[in-house]
Structures are given as structure tokens and as C-alpha cells.
């Protein structure tokens, strides 16, 4: 009995000139990853953020976001947002792929969503306000810097409560200490976010030293007085003989 097997395309043809372009290692890795996800019948790549980060090996959310934005600015890709917020459609420009007229695809589907680029405005405002209240800082609720770290965390299926927990843990640990300067969105919501999230919240309690009581010679019994006197005499004789 014959069994049908699906044929998976083992390669994608692309222009080797991408290796001559002015791209850093992250931009090049992301571009090649998008090429690997390219769907020739639809004319675009549509990987989720999670799959895109996994295959490109770019782990840090800000590094990933910067590489993606840079490819758009350099005109190498056209990013069209989707309704779900799980991922984007990515059209490859400048004839990066061989045998395809790529410029027509992007124009054909140029109906860009009018929704804000930020899919999580309420969540961002809540996290930024909470961060400010805990750290004493004054980030604006529409801060692009703060949003660039909050949004990737939300897209990785973490919650606002998860971020608040990390803020609580690290402010409890670092506030009013030499590490206070690390209370930033970049540090808290960067590559160590999940590690911080699973960290146990501890309270440091300083151990109290027992107060030493002054020795009162008058309070001890007569027998003890003689014993103490003899001890001090012996000590004095030992010191005297040593000298």
C-alpha cells in the first residue's frame, strides 16, 4: 500500500547581495529568517513573533525590535500589521528573492490597519504607572522606550501581573541601594525577565546583636569576689613574667 508523503521545500532562492549590504549580525539574521518563512504563493512571510525570535536566535526583546525596525527603515522589508497582534505580514523588497516580482505584492495588500501600532495601550499605561509609583521615576505613559520593552513581554504571553511582580521583587531588592540604577525597563523586562519572575521575594531582616552588660563587681557574692580577684591576680602575674 502506497503512502502519500508531503514534499517540503528544502530551500529558498535569494540574492547573495544581502551579504554585501550594510547590515549588522542581528539584522542579517532576521532578514535571512524572514526569507526562510517566505510563502511564494501568498507573496509574504507571516511567522509569529515567537517563531521569528526562535529561528533568528535573537533573544533580547529590544535587540529584536531594533533589528526589525532597522530593516523597515532601510527599505528591505515592508511590515503590514495584522488584526490579531500575534505577528505581522512581512513583504521582502528590493528583489531580495530571485524569480519573484516582489514590489507588486506589497502594493496589492497596502491596506494597513488604522489601529495604533501598540496593541496593548491600557496594559502599557498600567505597567508604566506602577513602575513610576514603585521607583519614584517619571516615565510618560506613552513612552516609546518603555513600550519597546513592555510589548514584547506581553507578546510572549506574560501578563501585567507578571510584570508588576518583577517590579515588586527588584524594587524590594535594589531600591535605595547601589543597584538602584538598574531599576530600568531595559533591565527588568530584558533577557532576565523570566528569571526575575521566578525569583523568591525575600525580606532582609537585620539580626539584632545582644547588648553587652557592664560587669558590676558589687553585685556578686563574697566567694565569687575572691575567685574573680584571684583570676585577675593570676593574669597580672602571667603578663608581668612575660615582660
Image (cartoon, rainbow, N blue to C red):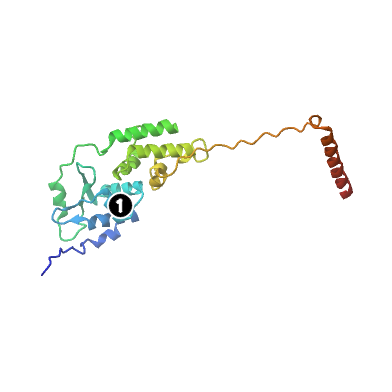
18 relative position to 7: left or right: right
Tally of numbered tags:
1
Q: Nearer the viewer, residue 224 or 35?
A: 224
**Is residue 24 visible from the viewing direction of this image?**
no
Above/below status of 74 relative to 220: below
List x then y, in percent, for residue 184: 42, 39
List x then y, in percent, for residue 122: 29, 33
Above/below status of 139 relative to 47: above
Above/below status of 191 relative to 209: below
Disc 1 crowd rating (10 Å Cα; few below 14, some 14-19, many 20+) is some
Residue located at (23% from left, 57% from top) = 35
List x then y, in percent, for residue 73: 27, 47
List x then y, in percent, for residue 95: 19, 56
Residue located at (31% from left, 44% from top) = 152
Which of the image's four quarters has the N terminus?
Answer: bottom left
**Is residue 222 visible from the viewing direction of this image?**
yes
Q: Secondary structure at mark 1?
A: helix
43 relative position to 17: left or right: left
126 relative position to 168: left or right: left
Q: To which residue does mark 1 refer?
A: 53
Residue located at (61% from left, 35% from top) = 208
Q: Nearer the viewer, residue 223 or 116?
A: 223
Residue located at (83% from left, 42% from top) = 231
Q: Residue furthest left?
A: 1
Amino acid at each position: 500500500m502506497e503512502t502519500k508523503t508531503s514534499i517540503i521545500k528544502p530551500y529558498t532562492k535569494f540574492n547573495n547581495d544581502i551579504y554585501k549590504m550594510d547590515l549588522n549580525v542581528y539584522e542579517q539574521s532576521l532578514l535571512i529568517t524572514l526569507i526562510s518563512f517566505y510563502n511564494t504563493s501568498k507573496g509574504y512571510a507571516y511567522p509569529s513573533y515567537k517563531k521569528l525570535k526562535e529561528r533568528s536566535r535573537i533573544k533580547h526583546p529590544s535587540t529584536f525590535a531594533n533589528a526589525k525596525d532597522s530593516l523597515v527603515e532601510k527599505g528591505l522589508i515592508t511590515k503590514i500589521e495584522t488584526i490579531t497582534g500575534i505577528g505581522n505580514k512581512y513583504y521582502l523588497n528590493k528583489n531580495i528573492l530571485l524569480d519573484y516580482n516582489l514590489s507588486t505584492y506589497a502594493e496589492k495588500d497596502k491596506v494597513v490597519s488604522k489601529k495604533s501600532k501598540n496593541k496593548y495601550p491600557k496594559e502599557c499605561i498600567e505597567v508604566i504607572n506602577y513602575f513610576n509609583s514603585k521607583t519614584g521615576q517619571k516615565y510618560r505613559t506613552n513612552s516609546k522606550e518603555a513600550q519597546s520593552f513592555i510589548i514584547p513581554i506581553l507578546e510572549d504571553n506574560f501578563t501585567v501581573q507578571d510584570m508588576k511582580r518583577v517590579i515588586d521583587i527588584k524594587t524590594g531588592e535594589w531600591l535605595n541601594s547601589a543597584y538602584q540604577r538598574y531599576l530600568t525597563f531595559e533591565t527588568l523586562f530584558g533577557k532576565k525577565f523570566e528569571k526575575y519572575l521566578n525569583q523568591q521575594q525575600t525580606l532582609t531582616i537585620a539580626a539584632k546583636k545582644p547588648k553587652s552588660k557592664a560587669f558590676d563587681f558589687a553585685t556578686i557574692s563574697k566567694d565569687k569576689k575572691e575567685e574573680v580577684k584571684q583570676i585577675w591576680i593570676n593574669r597580672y602575674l602571667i603578663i608581668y613574667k612575660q615582660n
